[in-house]
Amino acid sequence: MTRAWILPMLLVLCGSVLATGLVFSETTGVAAALLLVFVLLAGVNSPLVFPRSISALEAQRRSAVDGRPVVYWRSGCKYCLRLRIRLGRSARQLHWVDIWRDPAGAAAVRAVNDGNETVPTVFVAGQPHVNPHPEWVRKQLARSV
């Protein structure tokens, strides 16, 4: 769980240090703007942007029942973030598994990616698709609902 928060915390820490330095040089407006940018970057790279993650086993069980795709992701992944943002509200209908929080999810991703944790990996009807286009995922979701 802590691995998912390392990048956001480093961004906040770096932003705070830079902002503090700018406050001492009496440029408080720039310091506030810089700190805001770093906090926003931390928020975007945090697990908070993504729907609540479930375990890989629970996601597979739910997908077998409702036919919805399972998305394996990790925080800090720009491709996962792109997929999440481009899917918009429909992203909440997918089953999301954070591979940094779930060892079984990480193992499932490594099994189909030659031992690499390449994300996002989307499973549709048991078939893996690595870094698919968001429109394709949206179409697969529409077929399952």
Image (cartoon, helix red, strand yellow):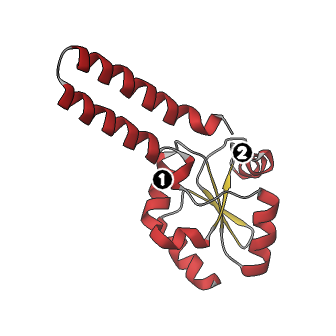
The quadrant the C terminus occupies is bottom right
- Residue 66 marker: none
**Vertical relation: 29 (above or below) 83:** above
Residue 15 at x, y percent in the picture: 37, 28
Crowding at label 1, few (<14), some or many (≥20) Cα neighbours within 10 Å? Answer: many
What is the C-alpha distance between the residues marked 1 and 2? 17 Å
Place residue 39 in its image quadrant: top left
**Tag in front: 1 or 2:** 2
Q: Which residue is mark 1?
A: 81
Residue 142 at x, y percent in the picture: 56, 83
Front residue (pair 13, 135): 13
Place residue 16 in its image quadrant: top left
- Residue 101 marker: 2
Q: SS for tag 2? A: loop
Q: Is residue 111 left or right of residue 85?
A: right
Front residue (pair 3, 80): 3
Residue 111 at x, y percent in the picture: 77, 49
Chain-order first, disc 1 or disc 2: 1
**Amino acid type of the residue that numbered disc 1 sits on in the rendered structure:** Leu
Number of numbered discs visible in the structure rendering: 2
Residue at figure coordinates x 49%, y 60% from the top left: 84
Front residue (pair 7, 32): 32
Residue 87 at x, y percent in the picture: 47, 68
Front residue (pair 112, 31): 31
